[in-house]
């Protein structure tokens, strides 16, 4: 085979290897990390997740303030374990806390909400205001 044919073949193979490394490798890494996260969630009890989440300051405060709260668990396909904390206040408004924690990188996302007894509107409280919201214990209108 002549040299002039070898160069385009080498360039073509290099482009193909680069494509696989740049485009396909992240896809395989995502699939692998999602499988690992799913494995961790399926082999860890809800009680262990509740103990872990109870160390988060907002969750700890919510549990202490509303000892008769209820919880529900779920997970999403990106490896985030989700726990919903719900409680009724003295005026029958529903105070809720929505906590997501990554089982892979341990990142945490928190939001709070309120369903008033006279309305079906839920107010979403951003993460940086959740602790103040929980301390005030009332649904403020926006």
Image: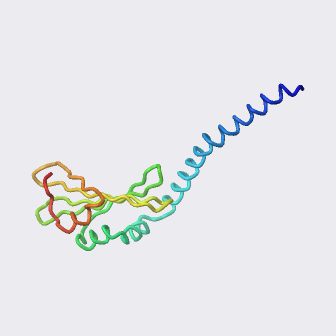
Using the image as rendered, state which of residue 87 and residue 121 is in the foreground.
Answer: 121
Residue at the far right in the pictured view: 1
Using the image as rendered, state which of residue 133 and residue 33 is in the foreground.
Answer: 133
Using the image as rendered, state which of residue 96 and residue 111 is in the foreground.
Answer: 111
Q: Is residue 18 above or below residue 110?
A: above
Give the residue displayed 46% in from the left and 62% down from the top. Answer: 106
List x then y, in percent, for residue 94: 19, 59
Q: Quadrant of the N terminus?
A: top right
Q: Is residue 56 above or below residue 42?
A: below
Q: Is residue 48 above or below residue 75?
A: below
- Left or right of 139? Residue 130 is right
Give the residue displayed 42% in from the left and 54% down from the top. Answer: 75
- Left or right of 76? Residue 138 is left
Residue at the far front in the pictured view: 4
List x then y, in percent, for residue 140: 14, 57
- Left or right of 129? Residue 26 is right
Give the residue displayed 18% in from the left and 63% down from the top. Answer: 88
Give the residue displayed 14% in from the left and 55% down from the top. Answer: 116
Q: How is the image coloured?
A: rainbow
List x then y, in percent, for residue 45: 45, 65
Question: In which quarter of the view is residue 55 placed?
Answer: bottom left
Residue at the far bottom in the pictured view: 64
């Amino acid at each position: 085979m002549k040299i002039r044919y070898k160069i385009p073949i080498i360039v073509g193979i290099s482009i193909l290897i680069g494509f696989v490394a740049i485009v396909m490798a992240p896809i395989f890494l995502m699939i692998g990390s999602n499988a690992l996260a799913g494995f961790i969630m399926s082999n860890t009890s809800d009680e262990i997740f509740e103990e872990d989440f109870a160390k988060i300051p907002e969750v700890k405060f919510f549990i202490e303030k509303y000892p008769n709260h209820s919880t529900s668990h779920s997970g999403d396909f990106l490896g985030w374990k989700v726990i919903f904390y719900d409680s009724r206040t003295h005026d029958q408004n529903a105070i809720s806390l929505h906590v997501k924690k990554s089982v892979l990188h341990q990142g945490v996302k928190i939001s709070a909400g309120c369903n008033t007894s006279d309305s079906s509107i839920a107010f979403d409280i951003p993460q940086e205001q959740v602790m103040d919201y929980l301390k005030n214990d009332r649904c403020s209108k926006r």
